[in-house]
Each structure stands twice: as structure tokens, then as C-alpha cells.
Image: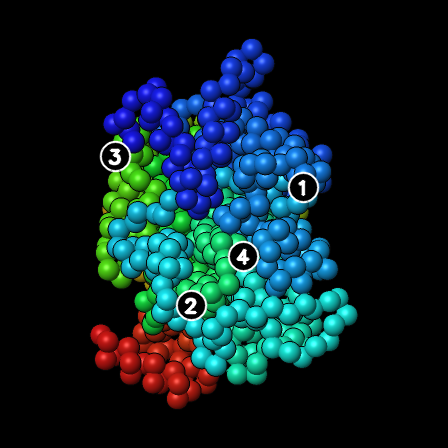
């Protein structure tokens, strides 16, 4: 048609003639009055009065429906108008609408004229009454001269089971002889042209095949009729309203009632039964028992049709039904369109047989044959409607996909076609999310959810999440996670990192046809969808990690925290302790933050820490914890590392609090090592000087033994912390960070690192009792340092007194006097006796108590470690008691389970 000249009058006349023939199904001679009337409408000069605005004409038609109480017809008209707008071939769409409105006006006028006998032409007699218009009023059939039709005139009002309108391709226009009979345009929706859907196209062309075969069947003298029901001549019986005759009904009457039922309309003998949710045959109907079951089975089409159509109408008008649901309704409507065509052809066949008496019309056997495929399709559609009721979005797609493994190729192709249309909005939303980070989901249908109340600092953790109930079954959980991470990475780059680099391949994917949505649910035969998800996920994640490492120096900040907060920079930590020794020995209330900050700066400048990046050093600061009564400076001092920007996503406030807890534990353990170093230094310096007091040898030995036990304990604990906990966990963290595919891998690896360190450093809830025991041991070490310092002070005083006495003897001797007088000798004797009786016993007793308390605490600590669930902590107990010194004193350490553990450790070694 595109090759013809659109302005050629002959072409216009030819096209109009074909249109009239197509609509009416009449011969060339019979359709001539219609053609003349149509030509008069088209060639009329309405330019001065007709509004060329397509929208205005459509509004007039819609308002006409509304004024006459046909709101549902108005909705259907708007849907048909939308499809007309989508057609690019027709240019003057307003003219088409105006022609239909003019035909409706003409039909209304001629219908009124016909009632007073003024109609003389077929077109003026109401085009809607022709064979191709559906549905029809039984009263309209009386003019055909058929007794069967006239007998139904008493049932002049046809009632629909579920719809106020009618079914078929003309369902938007109501009854034929209503107040506003309107000509019906045939709106044949084109079938989809998806790849691999040939079988589907073959199975859905029943209406077209039927239309092409009816003409030959009408003229055939060997038409097939049902067994035992065929008659050589159709009989006519008059059935009045209250007639209960059991005489057999003519086949034409049964077929007519079946066609009514096909449209969801109650007939004379086949009516809707709400208790059984289906159509039943009137028990008084004269239908032979042999075919009653067959008729009931055919009438089932009406119930299935009504169920599907009602669902489509309700959901199409539901504003809360999202794009996926609308696509589902469109797919169902597309399936019903073929059924509409079948109904239209059947009605046309019945109307064309109105004046025939040769009995060669439509038979039940033909009806069974032609409705076999539509009945199967309606059953499948009704089942789908029941399964999908109450579902939306991805859940609806999942319900459809569950039927994809059906063994019947017919059902499988039908489900695949519907699923392809339903999956298109999901596919479009998925592509938009993965390439642009855009999420348009007004009805919560997509499986990625967004919380607009979340701010940028929590964007990665809280703003986007998976809506598990909306993940389609054909998308795996791993794919869903990667899709979520891809779009989240794009939004994180734009909103937090201020990076708007477009994703590679975006230009290509935006031009892809949405019909390729079937790659999502055909993953068993193609890996195209998997490759697309993997490629975009890896490229986007790699770009995000590059921005974090290069622009925001994430790895450098991570290593800085290891050096300063986890005490990895040994020279800096030791020098800082030396500088803070006097200040931290003061009560916590006497500390000043600015003084401590100055000492921190001094420690940085005096060690290798000075060579770090300035951005890292300025983030390092001093923090004082909350002061409790009796706290010293050591108890409240800590270091702090300030974070901001994108790295704050990894180092969240919760993570920084965990790092602070770890720092306090490591700082306390480091202080024990520092104290014992001072203790050992004092012992070494005083052991020689105190040789002049032989009475102190026992106490000195006691101090050396206890100090050695404490040094061994702290050395093993420090070795365990530094090497088995920190270094091993740190090495695993760096490996995971370097091998990370996405930002979530880095966050998870860092969290695992913190959890491991907290658990193995006895900072978790399960190890609270053991940590309390360890802190008690630390307190005993501090008490020992205090006691030894006091002892050395008193011992040195005694040493100085004795040295003074000896020096006095030498001076008196040099002067020629007696070296000792009785008074001096008595005074010295009294002082030494007092020292030996009071000082030495008290100190010996104090050290003995400390030693016993320390050993008891250590033994209890070892018992608790031995039964800990962490293997590393159990190994620590073995190292602390490698020579079984404490095992010999503690029976609990000699239990069979502990023995098996020792054997296992030996085997491992």
C-alpha cells in the first residue's frame, strides 16, 4: 500500500471498498450503499467546522461514553487510541477518529429512522448490526426471518456474568441496540516477532485460519456436523419465557448460546452459576445427554475468559500496579485479542446463516475443532492468573518462570512469550541501574531497594539493599548481589567520590532492544546475561578501587593505622613512652591535652615517623578517655586517627571504636613490658651495690625469681599478640585487599581483621573473664614494681647508713681517736637490729604474698586458656607453661584433656 499514491481518488475508493467488505463480509453489490455513504463522509467539506486536533476528537468520543454510563468502554477506547498513536504508518489519525465518530452519529440517526420505517439502505440500517459486529441483542435478529432467533426475543436483555460491556473485538461499544450504537473498528494487534517464537505464531492464528475457512465451509455440501445431532434441515421451535418443554433444541440455538457463553454473557439455556464458578446448562433445556458434557466443556471457555479478562481490567485500572504488572496485563490482553477474533468470526458466521434453511451452517463439531486451541490457551491463562494473583514485580516473574519447565511445547511457548513481555521492565530497570545507577521503582517491583533518607556518609552501608522477595527465580543470588554492587558503586563514585566517569559499554547497551530480556531466563542455553553482569560488575568495581587507592590513598591510611594505633612503629612507641613517663604517672585529672599533644609532636620529629606523609601525620592526635576515680594518666591516654571522605566508609565510627579498644589493650601490655624493663634495670644496678648487706640476699633472690617469671609471661604474651595475632591477621588483610574484586570485599576483609584481633586479644564477650584475669596479673606486675622500688629505697638508705658509720670510723682513726666509742657502737647496733627485725621481714612477707598471688592468678589464667575454644589461645597456655612448672602445682592442668592437647601440640611441632 505504501507504493500507491495516497491522493489518487481511485486508490482511495479501492481501499474504502476493501474496508467495507472486510467489516461487513457482504458481496460487492450488497456493500455498494455502504461504500457510497462512506465516500460521502470522506469527500464532505467539513474543513470549516471540523477540529483537526486529534486530542480534542478523542476527548469528545470519551466524553460521549462517559455521558452514557460506559466508563469501561471509555477506558478501552483510550487504550485503543494509545495503540493507534503508536502506529507510524497512519498520518492523519484525527481523521480516522472523526470518521468513527461520524459513523456512530449516522448509525444512531438511522437506527431511530428505522424504528419508524424510514431506513432504506443497509448502511443506514445500522452497521453495528452486521455480521462482524459483536455482541448483538437477540431482538435484533428478528428481522432475519428465522424462527429460532425470534423465539429468543422474550429474553431481550442479555446479562454478562462479570462485565457490564461485551466481549470480542467490539467490546467497547456495548449492546447493538443501546441508545448509542457505534460502529466498531477492528483492532488487530500485531503479534510479536521474537526469535524462536514460530511455533507460538502458528498456534495463535486460530482466528485468522477460521476466517479463511468459513467461506469454503458455507458453500460446501459436505460440511461436518456433530454425531447424532446432525439434521438435514434446521427445525424451529417457539420457546416462550415460561416454556419448560424438553423438546430437543436446534443445533443453531445451542451454538448461539455457546457463543454467548464464550463472551461471558448468559444465554437462554447456558447460564452462569456463581456457586460452581462456571456456566451450567439449564436442566430444562432440550440438549441431548450425549452432547451435554461436550457443551458444558465448551461453555468453560466463557468462565476462563471472564476470569482472565476481569483480572486484566482490574489490574490495568489499578494505579498501584507497576510496570511489570502492566506488561503482564498487556501480554494477557494480547493473548485475548486472538480470542476476540475467533468470537467475531463465529458471530459473523451465525449472523450470515440467519436466513438460511439448508442446514449447512456452523456445526458443533466444527465449533469443537476451532475452539480446541483457544480453550487450551484460556486454561493456561486462567492458571497463570490464579498463580500470579496478589504478586507484582520480580515475584510475578518468578511465578511465571516456574512454568517454563512445562513438558508441553505449546504451554512452554505461551509462558515464554508472556514472560518475555513481563521481563522487559525488569531488564530495562536492571540495565539502567547497572550502567547509570538510576533506580526508578515507584511501586517497589525491582529487587534493588533504596532508602532516600540515608545520607552520603552511610550510602554504601544503608542506602541500597536487596529486596529478596522481588528477586526473580531466573536470577541467582550471586548475580543479584553483583547487580546491587554495580549500581551502588556508580552512585558511590558520583555522590561520595565526586567521580562521574561513565561506565564502559554504556553507549552500546543503551541502544539494545528490550526484547533481549529473554536472555535473563534462558541462561541454561546462553551465557550472554552472565557475561554482561560480570563484565560491568568488574569494570565498575575496579574503577572504584582505583579511585580509592590513587585519589584518596586508602592503602596508605590503612598502613598508618597499623603503625600508630596498633603499635607497629616500635621506635616511635618506645620514645613516646619515655617522654610520657612522668606525665602519665600523675593522676588523670592533672593531665592537659595540649601538653600531651606537644609531647606527641616531639616523638614524631625524633623518630622515623617524621618521614610519613604530612596528610597522615596531621590526622594523628591524642585522646583522653573518660576519667574514673583513682585513674592515672596511663589509664586514660590513647592515640586517635581522624578519618573523613570515602575512607570513612571503611573506617566507620564502629571500626574506630574497635581500634581504640585494641590500642588500649596493646598500650597496657606494652606498658607491662616497659615496667619490667625498668624492674630488670633496677635489679641489675642494685644487685652489686647491695652486696654490702648480706642480710638482703634472700629478698633479692626472691625479687629476681618473681621478676623472671613476670618477664617470661609478658614476653610470651607480647610474642603471641605481635606475631600470632597482629602480624598473621595483617598479612591476611593485605592479601585480601590486593585480591579484592569490589569495595565490599575490602570492607569485609577489614571487619574480619578487626574481629580476629578483638577475639584473640580477649576483647570479645566470650573472653571477658580471661581478660579480667589478665588485667589482674598486669596489676600485680605494677604492684611488684612499686614494692621493689620501695624496697630498694629502704635498702639503699640502710646501705648509706652503714657506709656513713664505716666512714666515720676511718675519720676518727685518722685523727688519732678511737675508731668506735661505746655510744656510737650501741647506736649502730640498735639501728641494725631494728632494720633486721622490722624492715627485712615485712619486705620478705610482701614479696611472698605478691609471688603467691601472681602464681595463683597465672595458674587460673592458664586453666581458662586451656579450655578456650580458640586454638591460638590454647597454644598460648602451652608456651606460658612450657616446662610444666605451673602444671605441677595445679591439678586442673593435669587433666586428661589437657594431656591430649599437649600431645597434639608436640605432634604439630
Q: CA distance from mark 3 to mark 4?
A: 60 Å
The CA distance from mark 2 to mark 1 is 35 Å
Q: Earlier in the sequence, mark 4 or mark 1?
A: 1
Q: Regarding mark 1 in the picture, which secondary structure is present there?
A: loop
Q: Which one is in front in this view, the residue at disc 3 or the one at disc 1?
A: 1
Mark 2 in CB contact with mark 1 (< 8 angstroms):
no
Q: Taking the image as drawn, is residue 4 in sight?
A: yes
Q: Residues within 10 Å of mark 3 (few under 14, many from 20)?
A: few
Horizontal side of residue 491 vs 239, given as left or right:
left
Q: Nearer the viewer, residue 229 or 192?
A: 229
Few, some or many residues within 10 Å of mark 2 (<14, 14–19, 20+): some
Which label's residue is closer to the chain start, 3 or 4?
Answer: 4
Residue at x 34% of width, y 81% of height: 901
Q: Quadrant of the C terminus?
A: bottom left
The secondary element bearing badge 4 is classed as: loop
| Cα–Cα gap, marks 2 and 3 | 52 Å
Residue in the picture at 29% in, 38% down: 512
Judging by the rendered image, the residue that carries numbered circle 1 is 70
- Residue behind mark 4: 354
Would you identify the image quadrant in which residue 320 lies?
top right
Q: Nearer the viewer, mark 2 or mark 3?
A: 2
Marks 2 and 4 sit apart, C-alpha to C-alpha, by 18 Å
Mark 1 or mark 3, which is nearer the start of the sequence?
1
Question: According to the image, label 3 marks what residue?
Answer: 508
Which comes sooner in the sequence, label 2 or label 1?
1
C-alpha span from label 4 to label 1: 30 Å
Q: Is residue 21 left or right of residue 248?
A: left
Amino acid at each position: 500500500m505504501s507504493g500507491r499514491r495516497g491522493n489518487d481518488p481511485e486508490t482511495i475508493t479501492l481501499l474504502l471498498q476493501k474496508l467495507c467488505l472486510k467489516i461487513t463480509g457482504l458481496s460487492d453489490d450488497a456493500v455498494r450503499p455502504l461504500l457510497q455513504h462512506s465516500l460521502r463522509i470522506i469527500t464532505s467539506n467539513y474543513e470549516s467546522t471540523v477540529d483537526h486536533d486529534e486530542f480534542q476528537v478523542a476527548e469528545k468520543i470519551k466524553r460521549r461514553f462517559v455521558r452514557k454510563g460506559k466508563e469501561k468502554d471509555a477506558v478501552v477506547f483510550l487504550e485503543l487510541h494509545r495503540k493507534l498513536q503508536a502506529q507510524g504508518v497512519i498520518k492523519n489519525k484525527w481523521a480516522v477518529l472523526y470518521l468513527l465518530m461520524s459513523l456512530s452519529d449516522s448509525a444512531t440517526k438511522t437506527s431511530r429512522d428505522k424504528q419508524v420505517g424510514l431506513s432504506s439502505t443497509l448502511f443506514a440500517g445500522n452497521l453495528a448490526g452486521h455480521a462482524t459486529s459483536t455482541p448483538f441483542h437477540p431482538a435484533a435478529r428478528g428481522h432475519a426471518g428465522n424462527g429460532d432467533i425470534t423465539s429468543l426475543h422474550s429474553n431481550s436483555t442479555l446479562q454478562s456474568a462479570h462485565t457490564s460491556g461485551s466481549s470480542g473485538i467490539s467490546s467497547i461499544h456495548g449492546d447493538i441496540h443501546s441508545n448509542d450504537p457505534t460502529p466498531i473498528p477492528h483492532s488487530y494487534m500485531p503479534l510479536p516477532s521474537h526469535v524462536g517464537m514460530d511455533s507460538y505464531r502458528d498456534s495463535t492464528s486460530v482466528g485468522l485460519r477460521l476466517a479463511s475457512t468459513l467461506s469454503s465451509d458455507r458453500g460446501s455440501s459436505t460440511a461436518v456436523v456433530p454425531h447424532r445431532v446432525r439434521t438435514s434441515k434446521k427445525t424451529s421451535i417457539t420457546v416462550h419465557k415460561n416454556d419448560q418443554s424438553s423438546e430437543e433444541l436446534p443445533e443453531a440455538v445451542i451454538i448461539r448460546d455457546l457463543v454467548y457463553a464464550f463472551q461471558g454473557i448468559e444465554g437462554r439455556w447456558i447460564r452462569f452459576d456463581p456457586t460452581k464458578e462456571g456456566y451450567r446448562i439449564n436442566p430444562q433445556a432440550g440438549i441431548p445427554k450425549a452432547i451435554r458434557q461436550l457443551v458444558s466443556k465448551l461453555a468453560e471457555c466463557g468462565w476462563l475468559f471472564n476470569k482472565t479478562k476481569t483480572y486484566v481490567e482490574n489490574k490495568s485500572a489499578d494505579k498501584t500496579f507497576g510496570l511489570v504488572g502492566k506488561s503482564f496485563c498487556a501480554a494477557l490482553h494480547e493473548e485475548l485479542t486472538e480470542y476476540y477474533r475467533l468470537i467475531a468470526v463465529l458471530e459473523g458466521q451465525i449472523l450470515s446463516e440467519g436466513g438460511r434453511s439448508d442446514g449447512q451452517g456452523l456445526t458443533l463439531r466444527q465449533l469443537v475443532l476451532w475452539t480446541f486451541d483457544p480453550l487450551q490457551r484460556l486454561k493456561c491463562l486462567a492458571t497463570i492468573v490464579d498463580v500470579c494473583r496478589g504478586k507484582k514485580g520480580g515475584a510475578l516473574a518468578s511465578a511465571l518462570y516456574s512454568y517454563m519447565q512445562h513438558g508441553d511445547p505449546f504451554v512452554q511457548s505461551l509462558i515464554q512469550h508472556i514472560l518475555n513481555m513481563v521481563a522487559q521492565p525488569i531488564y530495562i530497570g536492571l540495565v539502567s541501574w547497572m550502567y547509570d545507577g538510576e533506580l526508578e521503582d515507584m511501586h517497589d517491583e525491582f529487587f534493588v531497594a533504596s532508602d532516600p533518607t540515608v545520607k552520603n556518609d552511610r550510602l554504601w552501608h544503608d542506602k541500597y539493599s536487596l529486596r529478596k522477595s522481588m528477586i526473580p527465580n531466573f536470577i541467582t543470588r550471586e548475580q543479584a548481589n553483583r547487580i546491587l554492587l554495580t549500581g551502588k558503586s556508580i552512585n558511590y563514585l558520583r555522590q561520595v567520590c565526586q567521580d562521574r566517569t561513565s561506565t564502559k559499554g554504556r553507549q552500546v547497551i543503551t541502544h539494545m532492544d528490550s526484547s533481549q530480556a529473554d536472555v535473563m531466563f534462558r541462561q541454561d542455553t546462553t551465557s550472554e546475561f552472565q557475561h554482561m553482569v560480570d563484565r560491568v560488575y568488574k569494570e565498575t568495581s575496579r574503577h572504584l578501587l582505583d579511585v580509592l587507592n590513587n585519589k584518596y590513598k586508602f592503602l596508605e591510611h590503612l598502613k598508618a593505622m597499623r603503625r600508630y594505633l596498633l603499635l607497629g612503629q616500635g621506635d616511635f612507641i618506645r620514645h613516646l613512652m619515655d617522654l610520657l613517663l612522668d606525665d602519665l604517672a600523675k593522676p588523670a585529672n592533672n593531665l592537659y591535652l595540649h601538653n600531651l599533644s606537644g609531647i606527641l609532636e616531639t616523638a614524631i620529629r625524633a623518630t622515623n615517623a617524621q618521614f610519613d606523609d604530612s596528610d597522615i601525620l596531621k590526622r594523628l592526635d591524642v585522646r583522653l578517655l573518660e576519667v574514673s576515680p583513682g585513674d592515672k594518666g596511663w589509664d586514660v591516654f590513647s592515640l586517635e586517627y581522624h578519618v573523613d571522605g570515602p575512607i570513612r566508609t571503611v573506617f566507620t565510627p564502629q571500626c574506630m571504636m574497635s581500634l581504640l579498644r585494641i590500642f588500649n589493650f596493646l598500650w597496657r601490655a606494652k606498658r607491662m613490658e616497659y615496667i619490667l624493663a625498668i624492674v630488670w634495670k633496677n635489679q641489675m644496678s642494685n644487685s652489686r651495690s647491695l652486696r654490702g648487706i648480706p642480710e638482703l640476699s634472700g629478698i633479692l633472690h626472691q625479687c629476681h625469681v618473681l621478676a623472671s617469671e613476670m618477664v617470661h609471661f609478658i614476653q610470651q604474651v607480647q610474642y603471641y599478640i605481635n606475631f600470632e595475632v597482629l602480624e598473621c591477621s595483617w598479612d591476611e588483610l593485605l592479601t585480601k585487599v590486593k585480591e579484592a574484586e569490589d569495595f565490599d570485599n575490602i570492607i569485609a576483609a577489614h571487619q574480619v581483621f578487626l574481629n580476629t584481633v578483638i577475639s584473640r586479644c580477649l576483647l570479645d564477650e566470650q573472653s571477658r573473664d580471661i581478660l579480667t584475669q589478665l588485667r589482674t596479673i598486669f596489676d600485680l606486675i605494677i604492684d611488684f614494681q612499686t614494692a621493689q622500688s620501695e624496697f630498694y629505697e629502704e635498702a639503699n638508705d640502710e646501705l648509706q647508713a652503714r657506709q656513713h658509720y664505716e666512714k666515720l670510723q676511718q675519720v676518727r682513726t685518722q685523727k688519732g681517736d678511737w675508731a668506735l666509742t661505746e655510744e656510737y657502737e650501741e647506736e649502730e647496733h640498735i639501728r641494725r637490729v631494728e632494720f633486721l627485725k622490722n624492715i627485712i621481714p615485712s619486705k620478705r612477707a610482701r614479696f611472698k604474698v605478691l609471688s603467691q598471688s601472681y602464681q595463683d592468678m597465672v595458674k587460673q589464667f592458664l586453666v581458662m586458656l586451656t579450655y578456650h575454644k580458640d586454638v591460638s589461645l590454647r597454644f598460648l597456655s602451652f608456651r606460658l607453661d612450657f616446662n610444666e612448672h605451673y602444671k605441677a602445682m595445679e591439678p586442673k592442668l593435669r587433666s586428661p584433656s589437657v594431656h591430649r592437647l599437649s600431645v597434639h601440640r608436640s605432634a604439630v611441632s
